[in-house]
Image (spheres, coloured by chain):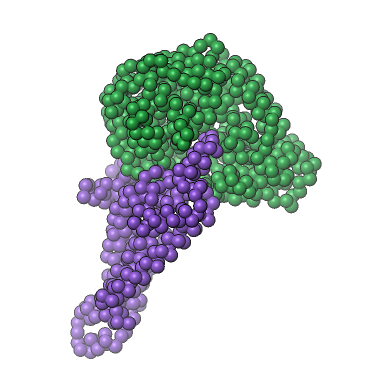
Chain colours: A purple, B green
Amino acid sequence: MWQYVLKRILLMIPTVVGAAVVIFLLLRAMPGDVCELKLGGEGAYVDEAQIQLCREQQGLNDSIIVQFGDFVAELAVLDFGTSMWTGRKVAYEMGLRFQLSLQVAIMATIVAIMISIPMGTLSAVYQNTWIDYVVRSISIAGIAVPSFWLGIMLLLAILSVSEALTGTRWTPPLDYVPIWEDPVYNLSMLIWPAVATGYRYSAVATRMTRSSLLEVLREDYVRTARAKGLAEQLIINRHALKNALLPVVTVIGIEFAFLMGGLVVTEQVFNLNGLGRLLVDSVQQSDYTMTQGIVMVIVLVFVVTNFFVDILYAWLDPRIRYS
Amino acid sequence: MRTKLWKLALGAVAAVAMATGAMAEEPKYGGILNYVVGSKIPSYDAHIETTFGMIHPIAPFYSLLIRVNPSEPASNDFQCDVCSSWEVSDDGLTYTYKIRDDIKFHDGTPLTAQDVLATYNKIIFPPEGIASSRKAFYKMVESMEAPDDTTFVMHLEYPSGAYLPAMASPFNFIYAKKDLDEHGYTWHQKNINGSGPFVFVEHQPGAFVTGKKYENYHHKGRPYLDGFKAISAPKLSARVQAIEGDRASIEFRGFPPKQRDDLVAALGDKITVQESDWNCVLLVTPNHEHKPFDDPRVRKALTLAIDRWGGSEYLSKIAIVKTVGGIVFPNHPLAASQEELEQLAGYGRDLEANRAEARRLLKEAGVTADQKFLFNNRGVDQPYRVVGTWLIDQWKQVGLNFEQQVNPSPVFYDILRKTSEFDVSIDFNCQSVINPIADVSKFLPSAGNNYANFEDAQLEDVYDKLARASTLDEQRKYMREFERLVLDEKASQAITLWWYKINPYRSYVKGWKIAPSHYLAMQLDQIWLDK
């Protein structure tokens, strides 16, 4: 097992290095200049000398080699540098948003698991019955409907329902308060994006659970268990579901990593100050250091999540670690 | 006389605004004002920043030397903030400001004329390596001094009508000399120590800024609010919903007409709306280095094709543009009258005659309908994309075929300012205090922020005379000549429609009056809540 873990850890290194090179080069290939935007983006008069001074201070006049060397040197000590837009440390800016993004990702994952595993199981066990059709309809709708659109509909519904019930229009809070400081305020803000994204997330996982469980239920060992006279609930819970969860775990792992930085539009709809919004802002502002930092963090989240998924595989199916 | 007329005209605009609350009511103390801001804070240092994303949340912490009257921000009525009075010498070359002796910074340091001197030195004569975004506005300033702690003197090289409006810029935060001396010229980018009506409490980047009332504020009895919270909300829909759900009371920049109508429909008399002309305008910038736009006939055809009077009517229903005007902010004493405007190419009321002339000029210049040109536009919906799409249609009417490239801001600027790979581009001129003599410098080929790629000694010469003109009549004369050259004879650039500012807000917000710029009157000391 340890050899398997070590192999997986070593595989992470070239992935991270490759991502660093690609993101650095892609950003430099994009047209745009943070100094032009920062100083002249509002149409005000800006001296060319001021723009050049800004570029000098940001290191943008250095050669690509020097810029890459600085980036790698900082990355090696997990220092993502200083934002070209705000002048604050990238790690500090990301840290502020990480908590919110992590909470939304965890809540959406919980929503997704709570919906997908029971619904996918029901759908498989009662294949081709009305239960199966209802579950499949709900999950297909979840895949078809973008979560940001669902978010907008949710907000409109909240406005209308709150007005109908209380006479005043209520909207979720706009500013984040940690859950341990004010759980009600926190949840009244984050439950909606978690539901909107968790629903789409659950739709994918439900379909995966259903198809995987259907496959497992046709295996010989399940037939043997039935022939032995084991109770159906025991067969599904103990023998079938555990093995059927392998692909589901993969989907949940990938989706979780995606949620950490990929909730770009949903964050805009709910005005969440998360990593996705920070990433969009930094790209729009040509803030190289910030964009590089966020992309590297997302890469790390993906790599680490996949690492844990691989470990989980090995635990769920011991044959994997020996192959 | 003209100045009085100007003030009356702008006063009338404010009166037409549908404000219901500001009429001689007794202000109430207390409450926290929540407002939404659609842009971000690059740094806290107003001397280097240009965005309302910084001004809206940070201006309440600072004082200015002089400011636009916050109770009548449309008037261009300048008032002392940290000064008690100012005098101008007979030759218009020396301005002497008396600085109040009862003001303290939030850290307890007394504010003196030395602080004002240090601040303006940073703005106008920054040391090498220190940025200052508006130092070019003060070309007329020769030197300055603070002979004692209550006197600040500025000496000008030549008298200029652009000087006083430039001094009232909302970006000229007064910093403590002590902070500059001890911490350096970049300290204010990340730290705040002002003498404004509110004391800084917290900034959570990307989320909000909070401030609390400064008990020792020098304008006695103010501020009325206990504090404020400026909430970052980049998405328009989030800002509208915030007001609808009363999470925020106001957004100071402005909403499009549709959002105003939605809010009014949803909230009725709980919403008040104020509207005003806005000191921002989108320009058509032809690239004079690209054929056939090196030919003044083709450039003139571009402006002749535009139906400004009709566009004003249609576009104002869907976008934040409305008023037909020349190069000067509409209704200003230096702006062209209706009759003067109608003499300029593309401003005549007979659209068909304008377009017939455009077609004739294009034919004469050898431009044919099968030629295709590139129009560079910015990927911002309001009002760039709306106006850009309208322009494409206008030009099509005279046989000019443009392909519109809507680019994200970094790409748009890269094309406009660096690569010049466009035939015609949208550009914009957006200023704070209405200061036409400074504002129109954008049309000078030497301006540095003019991207039409041309040279014109005649324009430079007329502008130089305008900048040095000491009487309003003289300024008007040169302004008309300058305008005629830019918009008509040389057609070096064209004006589309002036922006129109629409601010719907919760009716319990009182004391706030709309300004012709989203940068102005943001210290919030005049605002109170009728709750």
Image point (59%, 42%), residue name = B426
Residue B434 sits above or below residue B44 on the image: above
Query: Residue B37 in the image: x percent, y percent?
Result: 40, 39
Q: Is residue A220 or residue B63 the one in the foreground?
A: B63
Q: Is residue B88 or residue B201 the one in the foreground?
A: B88
Q: Is residue B248 or residue A15 the one in the foreground?
A: A15
Residue B173 sits above or below residue B452 on the image: above
Q: Is residue A155 visible?
A: no
* Quadrant in which the N terminus of chain A is drawn: bottom left
Q: Is residue B100 visible?
A: yes
Query: Residue B171 in the image: x percent, y percent?
Result: 44, 30
B278 relative to B79 in the view: left or right? right
Numbered-mark total:
0
Q: Is residue B122 or residue B421 the one in the foreground?
A: B122
B347 relative to A92 in the view: left or right? right
Image point (33%, 27%), residue name = B178
Query: Residue B204 in the image: x percent, y percent?
Result: 32, 43
Q: Quadrant of residue A320?
A: bottom left
Q: Which residue ends up furthest to the top in the rendered image? A: B90
Image point (43%, 44%), residue name = A85
Query: Residue B119 in the image: x percent, y percent?
Result: 41, 26
Image point (38%, 19%), residue name = B113
Q: Quadrant of residue B158?
A: top right
* Quadrant in which the C terminus of chain A is drawn: bottom left
B137 relative to A313 in the view: left or right? right
Residue A258 sits above or below residue A6 on the image: above
